[in-house]
Image: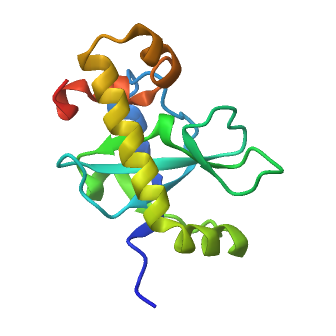
Amino acid sequence: MSTPAFRYVHLTSDFYQDFNWYVEIMKDPDRQYLHLVTQYKGHTFVIPFRSGINHPYSFRFSKEDNKGLDYSKAIIIHDMQKYVVPSAKPIPQKQHDLIVRKEQLILRHFYKYVDDYCKAVQNNDTNMLNRLGKYSSLKNFHQELGI
């Protein structure tokens, strides 16, 4: 079995201090993120774990609850060394195993979310933006995403 192309991380206090003006990001310093070790559109993203997801732009760990990875709250990290530290917080084994098994699906769905968001902004599609982007943290990264 190959090593997963992700790791579990936390954002540093420097991140929250340097980017306190970002809107729609998860502002809990104890929030755990899944760092996808991948470049997409030339950027590195981190996706937060959430326990109260109530929209489809996510990867849920089960149908019974609202816990999972929230694509709409993903952020781009420019300086991994300054703004990201490995998480010492354990991940439930079932969740970790599911992420490992579904890694490619998570990546595919996340990239589609980013692409759909970018397309909605470029087309000024108000209906789509209300669904995808009203509460999206991607609105902080229009310059990086070329929109």
Question: Residue at 31% of width from left, 42% of height from top?
Answer: 76
Horizontal relation, residue 59 to residue 127: left or right: right
Q: Position of residue 33 (x, y in %)?
A: 51, 53
Horizontal relation, residue 108 to residue 64: left or right: left
Question: Residue at 29% of width from left, 26% of height from top?
Answer: 119
**Furthest-bottom residue in this view:** 1
Number of dots carrying numbers? 0
Q: Is residue 99 above or below residue 3?
A: above
Which sits in the foreground, 92 or 130?
A: 130
Which sits in the foreground, 29 or 90?
A: 90
Which sits in the foreground, 16 or 52?
A: 52
Residue 121 shows in this picture: yes
Q: Is residue 141 above or below residue 127?
A: below
Q: How is the image coloured?
A: rainbow
Q: Position of residue 36 (x, y in %)?
A: 38, 60
Residue 92 shows in this picture: no
Horizontal relation, residue 22 to residue 146: left or right: right
Q: Position of residue 136 (x, y in %)?
A: 46, 26
Which sits in the foreground, 131 or 14?
A: 131
**Furthest-right residue in this view:** 64
Q: Is residue 124 above or below residue 80?
A: above
Horizontal relation, residue 93 to residue 22: left or right: right
Question: Residue at 80% of width from left, 47% of height from top?
Answer: 65
- What is the quadrant of residue 54 in the picture? top right
Q: Is residue 36 above or below residue 127?
A: below
- What is the quadrant of residue 101 in the picture? bottom right
Question: Residue at 47% of width from left, 25% of height from top?
Answer: 132
Q: Quadrant of the C terminus?
A: top left
